[in-house]
Amino acid sequence: MTQNLADTSRPAAAPIAANAGATRDWWRDAVIYQVYPRSFADANGDGMGDLPGVRSRLPYLRDLGVDAVWLSPFYASPQADAGYDVADYRAVDPMFGSLLDADALIRDAHQLGLRIIVDLVPNHSSDQHEWFQRALRDGPASPLRDRYHFRPGKGENGELPPNDWESIFGGPAWTRSTDPDGTPGDWYLHLFAPEQPDFNWENAAVADEFRSILRFWLDMGVDGFRIDVAHGLVKAQGLPDIGGSDQLKLLGNDVMPFFDQDGVHEIYRSWRRILDEYPGQRIGVAEAWTPTVQRTANYVRPDELHQAFNFQYLGTHWDAAALREVIDVSLDSMRPVDAPTTWVLSNHDVTRHATRFGNPPGGTQIRTAGDRELGLRRARAATLLMLALPGSAYLYQGEELGLPDVTDLPDEVRQDPSFFRQAGQDGFRDGCRVPIPWSGTEAPYGFGPTAGGPSWLPQPAEWAGLSVEAQTGDPTSTLELYRSALAVRRATPALGAGSEVTWLDGPEGTLTFRRDSAEGSFVCTVNTTGEKVLVGAPGRVLLCSTGSVEVNAGEAVLEADSTVWWAV
Ligand code: NOJ
């Protein structure tokens, strides 16, 4: 079912001319904007976002001032996990468009000076993938079974799973297959939903196939890959029991036999060689949940991937001491491998930071709206802090509008597969996936072409006031704050470049750091407290998360929960 570009003689989209062959590593301080295609823009009015919709909004992203766009999966998929269950890695799902649409999108993006990073899902396929279907159909003797993890069950009649591993989405990580004669057969491993069988990366055909998939998209002109579950591909020999339940809680503290195994690094070394064959600095970004930032650094050694998400930063609450510590540890961990640190506050798997910060500290899955005003104030300050740090920053669509999570979606509209499984991770990820508002006063607020038309998740009525149209030109809006911040960041190399911050003294609950570059110096002050704080004004105000800052006779009043950028 793999699609072909109608005109196979078309050359691949050209890399961005300005940077092709340039010595500067564009990705080291890039601001990368995550598009979740289902929820970004719906060109054909079916209620589901699509690639023509993304393409039509590329000028908006160029004007916002980001460097690259990461697209969550748009491949052929039964959508058991919103596209993270891929049935054909070389085809675009008809719900999102066609390969021609992907090609046109990449070309347009490059013309606008935007790079395109696509999601790659190598840990598992869809259960509808041709290999898995054949493995089931051809029975236990099928050589295709070895491309997945099929095992006989334990117990007298094989009625128990082969080991005690739990699925991240809840329940056992194993599902029993049915043999062609209709009798219960072997079990197969799925660290996520049963519709997402894990590949066996010991099988050479799996490794070959993914190298070929990489080349397919690189030939199409993409600038890089965000690698889903990059830490999960290799499983410990013998698939040993863990010996306890509630394993999800252990993630983040211990190395599990299914995560962060040393063998994964050989895979990334082979991928790096492929990326380096292409012009224009194509990159790999690891989604690797590891126990420590130090272990994350292993994924971005000079001969492996380029970046890894900094989930420790994402998980840090609005607290000066905790933020300073995670910033230091992050920078210190990446320095020895000469990789840029990344910063991220929101994505499609966690509660949006405008909602997290309006609630008491409680992890990345929050189910209550909390104090909206407080959350937004802190979110704006947190964004300016993030964009002042050295390295690359990731934005998630809609955060530039200050969107909160939708915490009151009715159960009947929810689609997150983990919502339907017991005792698994989160289950409430739909709240950050609600289609974003562009314009107008009636849902879907310009997400689709027709007022009153459908959207796959309902949008709250108050989002009319948060649309791109409503915020454009309003100097107090979050959108204009992001636009200004990204413009200043572009014009002030001291913001993203390098790998050092110099901490300066400041009152309790505040953070002050200085960044120096050949072009000039910059100071960032952050007040994480709920009170105004008086500090010495370090220079000229460049930007302030609350709109303005009072400076008098060399002293500045930092508003509660605010960040100020200063030129010094
Ligand atoms: C991480 C993705 O971000 C998430 O959305 C998905 O459910 C899992 N990987 C499984 O692919």
Image (tube, rainbow, N blue to C red):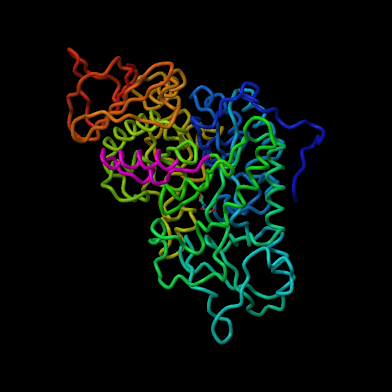
Segment tinted magenta in the rendering: 307-334
Q: Position of residue 485 (x, y in %)?
A: 40, 23
Note whether residue 47 is visible: no
Q: Residue at image x 45%, y 70%? A: 242
Residue 69, placed above or below residue 487: below
Note whether residue 544 is visible: yes
Q: Residue furthest top?
A: 553
Q: Position of residue 136 (x, y in %)?
A: 69, 69
Q: Position of residue 463 (x, y in %)?
A: 40, 34
Magenta stretch: includes residue 438: no
Q: Residue at image x 40%, y 38%? A: 331
Q: Residue at image x 66%, y 37%? A: 276
Could you tell me how many numbered marks the image carries? 0
Q: Which of the 4 image quadrants contains residue 464? A: top left
Residue 556, placed above or below residue 454: above
Q: Main secondary structure of the magenta part?
A: helix
Magenta stretch: includes residue 315: yes
Residue 557, placed above or below residue 528: above
Towards the viewer: 330 or 361: 330
Q: Position of residue 97 (x, y in %)?
A: 66, 40
Residue 288, placed above or below residue 530: below
Towards the viewer: 506 or 412: 506
Describe residue 305's horizontal placement relative to residue 530 as left or right.
Answer: right
The C terminus lies in which quarter of the figure? top left
Q: Residue furthest front?
A: 336
Q: Residue furthest bottom?
A: 156
